Image (cartoon, grey):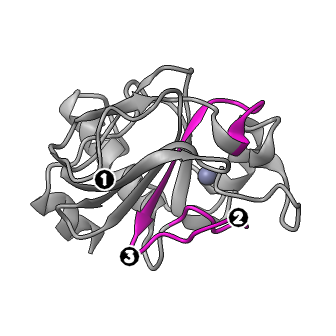
């Protein structure tokens, strides 16, 4: 299904210059979202065009943009470094600038990152699934988009050009988030969208 989406829509990777970083599921386990670590201010763009249905600032998500993509999926971009450049009701194109990577909301004090939830509806509130999409593997989609961008840049990939889906990535991503809520285990009162 993800391959069909990739073939049909021209996604771009939402965080500029991410090529060599590691993609991780939200909290290392929830595949409806991912935390994309990058320096503060790194441009965040819409990975697919669509309709902006909410923007604002939340104490959990910080600066956020919610939109329905042209692919029918819901997208939740959070922790932006500044108020979103788009407004509710805007129909935006793929690659539209939203804000910079930041650490607003409950990411405050932790490493700057884009939290991106993708799915059929987005879970509200806190907890490991907060801000993540329902019934969708956001991490796999992001991985495929990153790979296709890399191929276009003529960067060498594995022999079959397909991603590894090994769950072993979980250990690595803990290392990517040495502080802040990202590394907080389940059950913490701090749990949230981060
Ligand atoms: Zn997250």
Using the rendered view, name the quadrant where residue 29 is placed.
bottom right
Can residue 65 be seen here? The reply is no
Residue found 70% across the figure and 30% down from its top: 111
Q: How many marks?
A: 3
Checking the image for residue 160, the label placed there is: 1
In terms of secondary structure, where does tag 2 sit?
Answer: loop
Checking the image for residue 120, the label placed there is: 3
Of the residues tagged 3 and 2, which is closer to the observer?
2
* Contact between labelled residues 2 and 3, with CB atoms less than 8 Å apart: no
Mark 1 or mark 2: which comes first in sequence? 2
Q: Is residue 49 left or right of residue 64?
A: left
In the picture shown, does residue 122 fall above or below 177? below
**Ligand 1 neighbours mark 3 (CB distance < 8 Å):** no
* Contact between labelled residues 2 and 1, with CB atoms less than 8 Å apart: no
Kindly report the distance in space between the C-alpha atoms of the residues bearing marks 1 and 2: 39 Å
Which region of the structure is painted magenta? Answer: 106-132
Q: Determine crowd level at label 1: few under 14, some 14-19, many 20+ residues with C-alpha closer than 10 A.
A: few
Residue found 55% across the figure and 27% down from its top: 38
Residue 122 belongs to the span the image colors magenta: yes
Q: Which one is in front, 66 or 158?
A: 66
In terms of secondary structure, where does tag 3 sit?
Answer: loop
Kindly report the distance in space between the C-alpha atoms of the residues bearing marks 1 and 3: 30 Å
Checking the image for residue 126, the label placed there is: 2
Of the residues tagged 1 and 2, which is closer to the observer?
2
Q: Main secondary structure of the magenta part?
A: loop
Residue found 11% across the figure and 62% down from its top: 8
């Amino acid at each position: 299904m993800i391959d069909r989406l990739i073939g049909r829509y021209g996604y771009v990777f939402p965080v500029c210059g991410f090529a060599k970083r590691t993609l991780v599921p939200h909290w290392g386990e929830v595949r409806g979202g991912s935390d994309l670590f990058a320096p503060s201010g790194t441009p965040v763009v819409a990975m697919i065009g669509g309709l902006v249905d909410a923007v604002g600032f939340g104490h959990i998500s910080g600066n956020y943009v919610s939109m329905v993509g042209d692919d029918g999926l819901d997208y939740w971009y959070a922790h932006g470094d500044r108020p979103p450049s788009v407004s509710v009701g805007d129909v935006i194109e793929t690659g539209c600038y939203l804000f910079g990577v930041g650490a607003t909301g409950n990411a405050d004090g932790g490493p700057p990152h884009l939290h991106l939830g993708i799915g059929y509806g987005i879970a509200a509130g806190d907890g490991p699934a907060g801000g993540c999409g329902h019934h969708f593997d956001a991490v796999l989609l992001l991985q495929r988009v990153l790979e296709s961008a890399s191929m276009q840049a003529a960067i060498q990939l594995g022999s079959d050009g397909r991603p590894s889906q090994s769950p072993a990535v979980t250990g690595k991503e803990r290392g990517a988030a040495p502080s802040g809520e990202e590394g907080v285990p389940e059950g913490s009162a701090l749990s949230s969208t981060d």
